[in-house]
Image (cartoon, rainbow, N blue to C red):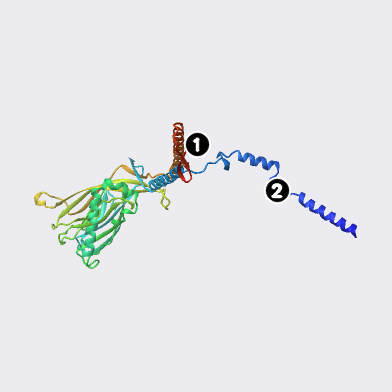
Amino acid sequence: MSNISINSQSAQSDTELRHRNVPSAPESAAKSPVSEEMVKAVRKLDVFTKLPEDCRSSGTASGAGITLVTFLLMFLLVCVEVNNYMERRVQFAYGVDPDHSAEMLINVDLVVASPCVSIGMDVLDITGTETHGTSELEEIPTDFELDESSRNRFSIRQHMQEAIRQHHHALQSDLFADKGWLNVLGSEHFQSPNERKAVSACRLRGRFRVNKVAGNLHLTGGKPVNFGGTHAHFQASHATALNFSHRIYHLSFGEDVPGRINPLDYEEKVTQHASTNYQYFVQVVPTELHRRGLSAAAGATVRSFQYAVQELDRVIDHGRGSHGLPGLFFKYEVSPLQVVVKDAGLPLSSFLTNLAAITGGVFACSALLCYLVNAAWDRLCRAMAGRGSSHLPVVTDAGIRYASPLS
């Protein structure tokens, strides 16, 4: 029995020794020569030097002050850079219009102090093409006078539009940059007291699709007709004299573009003469708008038109040699040059580069400043020690104390 117990104990001890000598899989893998060589090769790529703990100096009061100033300056510069990136700028360029499309839109919304049955509006261009048959124009019987609330709102928008006209060149960049700013002058319904019931005036609202050539958008007495290629407006002989006092809510060319200024918006002309001829000479300039950003329309090119206008009105009096037709005549010409509006904001790559330059530059300059301060302080201490000063300034974590040179 004793032999059996001795043998079992020796076998158990041999088994424990075997388990102790057999390394686990991760340990054997970690100690393999290939893995060690790979770790050494990767460590050689480390360009950031490290100092041992016993070689590192403790912080000083001057270093702490420079650190606070460094982070404060870095925060201010980053805020300035972020604001510079978020600020939108536009850049204007000019060139020959490359768009050879044959059509453009004329958008109109105005009220004339004459009944709808007695007037007509259409477009006739220099090619002789008429558009009254293909236009999207709605004629709404209304009253020319506005109610008190609508009159007040119209007057406010009229004054704002006048201010925009006077400061057009100073505001144009900001208006194109901020696409939501001009919404305060957006289209609005101004209610007449008897809209759709009275017949003293007519509101014409809609659009014309016309050839991209010079033409004449006109509104005069009678409905437009075409007799064998001859354009005319037919009016009953017993019709009364018409008053062409008018209020223009909106007149533009092309698709709507945020930031565009329409000089004739909220224009109002009132006359007491029955036969008055109003002429607006419009110079239409093609405009190409490029935008950047994260919106669905970002990066797309939007084509539209701006225009400048001059106006002239006179009373028709054949006895005094003032001939012509009473009505409204918008005579427009299309410029062969175009304006290109580009978003000239800071790109994301430049923004990130500037941020990296700010952080790296501030840290490098602060380290240099800290080195110069410490060097100057050491030189001062040595100079005072050489002169035999009995009390030398010593910088410690608790502050500055004066010690004897013999201590």
At x 15%, y 54%, the residue is 276
Which residue is denoted by mark 2 in the rendering? Answer: 27
Of marks 1 and 2, the one in the foreground: 1
Query: Taking 307 as reference, is 4 above or below it?
Result: below
SS at badge 2: helix
Q: Position of residue 184 (x, y in %)?
A: 29, 56
In the image, 16 versus 88, the foreground residue is 16
| Label located before the other in sequence (1 or 2) | 2
In the image, 148 versus 385, the foreground residue is 385
Query: Taking 219 as reference, is 99 above or below it?
Result: above
In the image, 88 versus 28, the foreground residue is 28
Whether residue 91 can be seen here: yes
Q: CA distance from mark 1 to mark 2?
A: 57 Å
Q: Quadrant of the N terminus?
A: bottom right
Q: Position of residue 332 (x, y in %)?
A: 25, 48
Q: Position of residue 364 (x, y in %)?
A: 46, 39
At x 14%, y 50%, the residue is 323
> Image quadrant of residue 4?
bottom right
The numbered disc on residue 406 is: 1
Query: Farthest residue in the top direction?
Result: 386
Q: Amino acid at mark 1?
A: Leu
Q: Amino acid at mark 2?
A: Glu
**Mark 2 Cα shell of 10 Å, populated few (<14), some (14-19), many (≥20):** few
